[in-house]
Image (cartoon, rainbow, N blue to C red):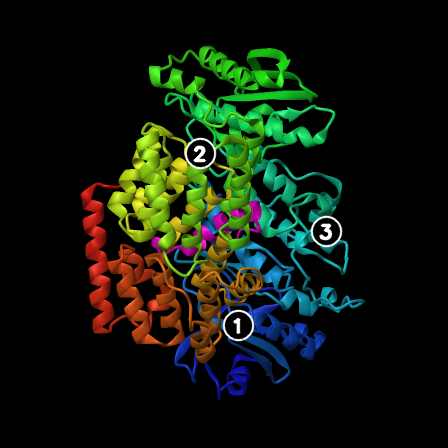
Amino acid sequence: MTLDALTVALADRYAIERELGRGGMATVYLAQDLKHHRQVAIKVLRPEVSAELAADRFLREIRTTANLQHPHIVPVFDSGAAADQLFFVMPLIEGETLRERLEREGALPLGEALRLIGELAGALEYAHEAGILHRDLKPENVMLSRGHAMLADFGIARSADTPGDDRLTRVGSSVGTPAYMSPEQAAGERELTAASDVYGLGAILFEMLTGEPPFTGPTPEAILVKRFTTDAPTVRSLRADAPAACETAVARALASDPDFRFPTAAAFAAALIAEAPPAARPAPTVDSRSLVVLPFVNQSPDPDNAYFSDGLTEEIISDLAAIKSLHVISRTSSMLLKGTTKGVPAIGRELGVRHVLEGSVRKAGNALRITAQLIDASTDTRVWGDKYGGTIDDVFEVQERVAREIVAALGITLTSDEDRHLAERPIEDPRAFELFLRARQEMRRYDLASIERGEELVRQAIAIEGEVPPLKALLAWGKVTRVKAGVVADMSGLDEAMVVAEELLQAVPDAPFGHSLLGFIGYIRGTMPEAIGHLRAALEREPDDADAIFYLGIGVLGCGDIAAGERAAARLMAVDPLAPLTWLLAGVVHWWKGEAEVGLPKLERGFALDPGNAMIRWTVGYTRALVGDAAGAARDAAVLVREVPNMPYTPQLLSIVQAMEGRQEEARATLQGVQLLDAHQRFHLAESFAAAGDTERALDLLEEAVDGGFHPGDFIATYCPFFESLRGTPRFEAIAEKALRFTREFVASGVAP
């Protein structure tokens, strides 16, 4: 069909202006959408392609993909047939294709390549969750606009891929592109999985990093022959500055067997983020006095004695973490390495530490045998090692000896306080200590059932050990967590916890317990300068307390101090790089900067580490809503409704999803009767009421949140999409200016570290 004929056929809807470009299967035209008064791009399949496709199948696939709503997927506005030619309509994207960028510049900067691939992985993960594969990933189908990547042409490859039909090959087109097609797709397999798109994503990243595809050749046939007969070059053979782990991740994505690839695009992205260079995430500094304590291996005849080896590991970590000149990876990250098959050098690189302590425990009856050795991860050589024998009554003496031997091996001189700390045993009974550890883990999950289980475990430990400070503090922390999770009707638990905190300050002033509790309580009540003072005091006493660092970071971000929040996130990443809450803090930093899509893969990594954590699921769902992924947010909200319906964050997310889907009245009904406690909850409920169309209630809650100490000024004034309907109104602008003023005052005060 000529351009004139096409113009006439579409004249009632679109005014075609000129051709923008053409490819193997279609031509793209610039046009005016007459109904909506906007410029669009119309992709018209070539006549010979349209003639060979089943129009109903094509339009059905386009309708399916038109439901994909994700910030990194080019949306479909319209589709149809015009005089026997098939077409679909997209927004006109300002920018260029990745292919054009690669042809102009060659390989991209390392950090930018990893960031862009993370955005594409997020788009693919979203589509895969909806049951849609792309099938034709290539740089030509990646648009670069304002520094971000967007995937185009979902559905075309699927509609062309008709079983038993090779007519498209005969007309000169191909289903997929040889340089980026997975081996199973190139072999004609029909039942493809997400791993097929992972292959294409790996091939695109390979080219972004090296400037060329993993397989090249003069013809498509030559490329396919190479793929099936040789391995792709390694990334670092073509780009020396690529991290070793990045090379490993790309090689796995390009594995010939789909079972050996990453099963999901999110898993591929997470592997890259975990090993990203400084441009993508801050890398921990490696110094000679940094170490991780691997979980001691239980070699006892009874596997139930694992609690004992875990307890010993925890105590050694606690002892060493109290030495200020020594950087020790936190227990959460350490325990995630239980049973790891990674070598010591790999662990050192992953965690950014110089030394690794490993050991084993054998307990038979009352007899005990412990071995330990300290290894230099940079050279994989032993620095120190020893064996200890005795009875169960000797265990705390052994752990003290191990700690002192390590201090001596690293040339550290202890202060008098540190020397005294190594001799102290706040919890002396191993059974009580194991119960304490289990209780603390339960309470970090923020749902009522977990909190109640944690409290019962603490009570069991107290029955064994007595009401010693760590157990007394953890029981009080349960009261604080109930308020923070919104599973109680009032904040009286904070008053009870404050009494305990003051008692702990009097009883053990050199311990972090009282200050930590008061910091957490102040965070919830919105008295941030006071809360930060206590959290800083707690960290002076226990520098690697991951919980205190986390709440310090969340608190300063809520006050609008993004720089301080980023410093806290970097500190937590260095202390506890494998913990779920570490990745939560690293991800939410990007909310306040107006780049939620950058933080989403980090949050998804944290969620993958603890998929049962209700607060992390809410955080992921809320972030998906921020980036416009209503379907993804709806899936998270459905799980929260099923598992933690009484948590106030559950109706908050559900109502936002309902509003995004155009069900404002239903959203308002969802919000009726929601329990309101702290300023953080009021802020997020203000978003929900704004999205649901209840302007006055939204403004009331927003002002209460700001006055209550939660005032991320830039996010309120500029970035939060749910306040868009309020912007420009006098009351909202006054509240936003107040939040900005509070933020400026907070930053200028220098309270945040």
**What secondary structure prevails in the magenta region?**
helix
Quarter of the C terminus within the rendering: top left
Residue 378 appears in the figure: yes
Q: Which of 127/619 is in front?
A: 619
Would you say residue 610 sits in the magenta stretch? yes
Give the foreground label among 2 and 1. Answer: 2
Would you say residue 154 sits in the magenta stretch? no
Q: Secondary structure at mark 2?
A: helix
For disc 1, the marked residue is 76
Q: Residue at x 72, y 57 (%)?
A: 192
- Would you say 513 lies left or right of 184 here? left
Residue 575, horizontal then vertical, whole percent: 44, 33
Q: Amino acid at mark 2?
A: Pro
Q: Residue at x 48, y 23 (%)?
A: 291
- Would you say 519 lies left or right of 751 here? right
Residue 64, horizontal then vertical, whole percent: 61, 72
Residue 1 falls in image quadrant: bottom right
Q: Secondary structure at mark 1?
A: loop
For disc 2, the marked residue is 470
Given the current orientation, which residue lies at the most extreme bottom position?
A: 12
Q: Which of 114/553 is in front?
A: 553
Q: Which residues are magenta?
A: 592-613
Mark 2 or mark 1: whose residue is earlier in sequence: 1
Mark 3 or mark 1: whose residue is earlier in sequence: 1
Residue 508 falls in image quadrant: top left
Q: Amino acid at mark 3?
A: Glu
Give the foreground label among 3 and 2. Answer: 2
For disc 3, the marked residue is 221
Q: Residue at x 55, y 70 (%)?
A: 27
- Would you say 3 lies left or right of 229 here? left
Q: Residue at x 67, y 72 (%)?
A: 49
